[in-house]
Image: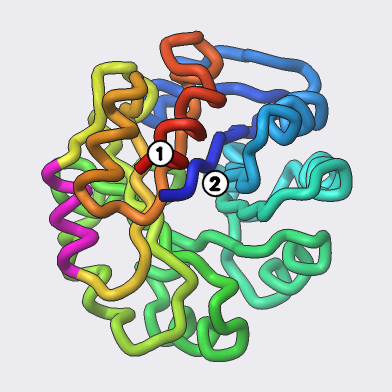
């Protein structure tokens, strides 16, 4: 199982939100580039980036910082937040990102997203953010009437790189991930599922690995110190 430490960007800083709430923000670093380099030095090979400003505004905002991060580390980097059109996808991939995550645009414009997946095979990730099993959109500010599994079913025939499945109820709360729901999503689809939300301890990582998840995103737990990145990497190496 792959470990993807997370850097959430807002105003050029490394922050974390609780349950996607922009009013419940904690700033962990003024230097996200240094944070990415620290993750790389600890042995991480993957990095998950989120442009929180972009997710809210509908267009990338922290593009310059993202470019600096990608140029500074030898890691497979992906980014989500504010990706709504082909020009943005191309611009982000041109920065050196390996993958681009789309959620809101995929939900609202499914045919267009399927076309983008054909144009950029294995480079686009479907981001499914769920609240009570229903897909949330627009930076988690809105909840749709589409079930998470129904959204995944719409893209079975396209060359997705992966699905990032985020459980909003647990995200940033340090109370453990919703392992049964995440495992159910992985069983439901044929592409790798990346678990996101609530991962707090080494045991959480171990259980997700045992449940068959392809990867896990870890954010607040690393910053708060409830889980050391080196420990998570060691666990997956032993499995």
In the displayed orientation, state which residue is furthest to the front. Answer: 238
Instruction: Give the residue drawn at x 67%, y 63%.
Output: 98
Where residue 156 appears, as percent x and y from the top left, is 29, 82
In this rendering, position of residue 146 left or right of residue 233: left
Is most of the magenta stretch helix, strand or loop? helix
Q: In what element is the residue under mark 1?
A: helix
Instruction: Give the residue drawn at x 25%, y 24%.
Output: 176
Asked if residue 23 shows in the view, the reply is no
In this rendering, position of residue 195 left or right of residue 176: right
Of badges 1 and 2, the one in the foreground is 1
In this rendering, position of residue 164 left or right of residue 89: left
Where residue 97 appears, as percent x and y from the top left, is 72, 59
Where residue 201 appears, as percent x and y from the top left, is 34, 19
The mark total stands at 2
Read off the magenta span. Answer: 180-188
User: Pointer 1: residues within 10 angstroms few (<14), some, or many (20+)?
Assistant: few
Mark 1 vs 2, N-terminal side: 2
Instruction: Tell me: residue 109, above or below residue 44.
Output: below
Of 207 and 57, the residue lying toward us: 207
Query: Would you say residue 23 sits in the magenta stretch?
Result: no
User: Label 1 belongs to which residue?
Assistant: 238
Of 232 and 28, the residue lying toward us: 232
Quadrant position of the C terminus in the picture? top left
Instruction: Tell me: residue 57, above or below residue 102.
Output: above
Instruction: Give the residue drawn at x 41%, y 26%.
Output: 21
Where residue 50 sits, quadrant-wise, is top right
Asked if residue 230 shows in the view, the reply is yes
User: Label 2 belongs to which residue?
Assistant: 55
């Amino acid at each position: 199982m792959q470990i993807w430490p997370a850097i959430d960007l807002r105003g050029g800083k490394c922050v974390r939100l609780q349950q996607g709430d922009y009013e419940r923000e904690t700033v962990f670093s003024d230097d996200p580039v240094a944070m990415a380099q620290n993750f790389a030095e600890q042995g991480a090979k993957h990095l998950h980036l989120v442009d929180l400003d972009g997710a809210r505004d509908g267009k990338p905002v922290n593009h310059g910082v993202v470019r600096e991060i990608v140029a500074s580390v030898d890691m497979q980097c992906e980014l989500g937040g504010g990706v709504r059109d082909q020009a943005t996808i191309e611009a982000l991939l041109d920065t050196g990102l390996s993958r681009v995550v789309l959620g809101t645009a995929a939900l609202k414009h499914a045919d267009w997203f399927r076309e983008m997946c054909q144009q950029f095979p294995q480079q686009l990730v479907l981001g499914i953010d769920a609240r009570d099993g229903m897909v949330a959109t627009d930076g988690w500010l809105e909840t749709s009437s589409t079930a998470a599994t129904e959204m995944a079913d719409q893209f079975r025939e396209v060359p997705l790189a992966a699905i990032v499945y985020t459980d909003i109820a647990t995200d940033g709360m340090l109370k453990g991930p919703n392992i049964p729901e995440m495992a159910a999503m992985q069983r439901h689809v044929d592409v790798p599922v990346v678990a996101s939300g609530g991962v707090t301890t080494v045991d959480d990582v171990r259980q997700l690995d045992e449940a068959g998840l392809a990867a896990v995103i870890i954010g607040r737990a690393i910053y708060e110190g409830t889980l050391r990145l080196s420990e998570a990497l060691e666990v997956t190496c032993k499995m």
